[in-house]
Image: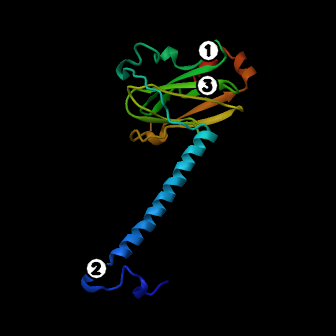
């Protein structure tokens, strides 16, 4: 620890003024520290973007939140997992205070999965831990994220954007089943694993 008198910023000068060169030197030091922090943070963003395929959602698609249940892509009968002709799956989910609909999603392992989500009320968050899936779900917009699950397993799907008093309890599940097993399921069983 320096003696107080050896600290130039504390040294008593006439009028209590710190010499200009001391201020300039200190500011320059902090500038270097800030530049180093920015460089490190940029490097982390770029590295995780490349290595883990993390990227900001770039889908801009608008939708009328008041009529979600009446017409269009997000009517109740169209929610859950749908199998496309090429073997990939599309999962459609509505986020609302304080549930995801459906509450449990079933998808095959090893196939491309496209999640399409929208909100019926306020901003929610959609996060699948240990995957590249993490997006905000904003009313009036459709959020689209793509991923694929390498191994079967159960994923928790918490809402990760504060959306009101019930936010902490807003949790759904993704059940990833082996491809062969998924193919044997009935249409209803594929669509959702939420209790009917
Ligand atoms: Cu929905 Cu927090």
| Mark nearer the N terminus (2 vs 3) | 2
* Left or right: residue 25 compared with residue 181: left
Mark 1 secondary-structure assignment: loop
**Residue 185's image quarter?**
top right
Residue 113 image label = 3
Residue with the most extreme front position? 21
**Residue 115's image quarter?**
top right
Q: Is residue 92 above or below residue 50?
A: above
Q: Disc 1 marks which residue?
A: 84
Q: Position of residue 172 (x, y in %)?
A: 54, 33
Mark 3 secondary-structure assignment: strand
> Could you tell me which residue is drawn at 38 percent across and 25 percent down?
140
Q: Is residue 152 above or below residue 192?
A: below
Is residue 194 shown to the viewer in this render? no
Q: Alpha-carbon neighbours of circle 1 within 10 Å: few (<14), some, or many (≥20)?
A: few
| Mark nearer the N terminus (1 vs 3) | 1
Q: Disc 2 marks which residue?
A: 17
Looking at this view, is 89 or 183 the one in front?
A: 89
> Could you tell me which residue is drawn at 56 percent across and 49 percent down?
43
> Could you tell me which residue is drawn at 39 percent across and 41 percent down?
165
> Could you tell me which residue is drawn at 61 percent across and 40 percent down?
50
């Amino acid at each position: 620890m320096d003696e107080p008198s050896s600290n130039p910023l504390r040294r008593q000068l006439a009028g209590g003024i710190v010499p200009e060169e001391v201020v300039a030197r200190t500011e320059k030091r902090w500038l270097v520290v800030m530049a180093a922090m920015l460089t490190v943070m940029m490097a982390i963003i770029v590295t995780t973007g490349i290595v883990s395929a993390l990227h900001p959602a770039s889908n801009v698609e608008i939708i009328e939140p008041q009529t979600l249940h009446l017409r269009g892509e997000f009517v109740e009968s169209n929610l859950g997992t749908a199998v496309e002709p090429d073997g990939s799956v599309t999962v459609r989910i509505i986020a609302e205070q304080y549930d995801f609909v459906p509450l449990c999603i079933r998808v095959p392992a090893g196939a491309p999965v496209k999640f399409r989500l929208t909100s019926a009320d306020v901003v929610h968050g959609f996060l699948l831990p240990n995957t590249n899936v993490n997006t905000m779900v904003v009313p009036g917009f459709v959020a689209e994220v793509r991923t694929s699950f390498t191994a079967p397993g159960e994923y928790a799907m918490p809402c990760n954007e504060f959306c009101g008093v019930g936010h902490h309890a807003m949790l759904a599940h993704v059940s990833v089943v082996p491809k062969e097993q998924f193919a044997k399921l009935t249409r209803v069983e594929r669509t959702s694993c939420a209790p009917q």
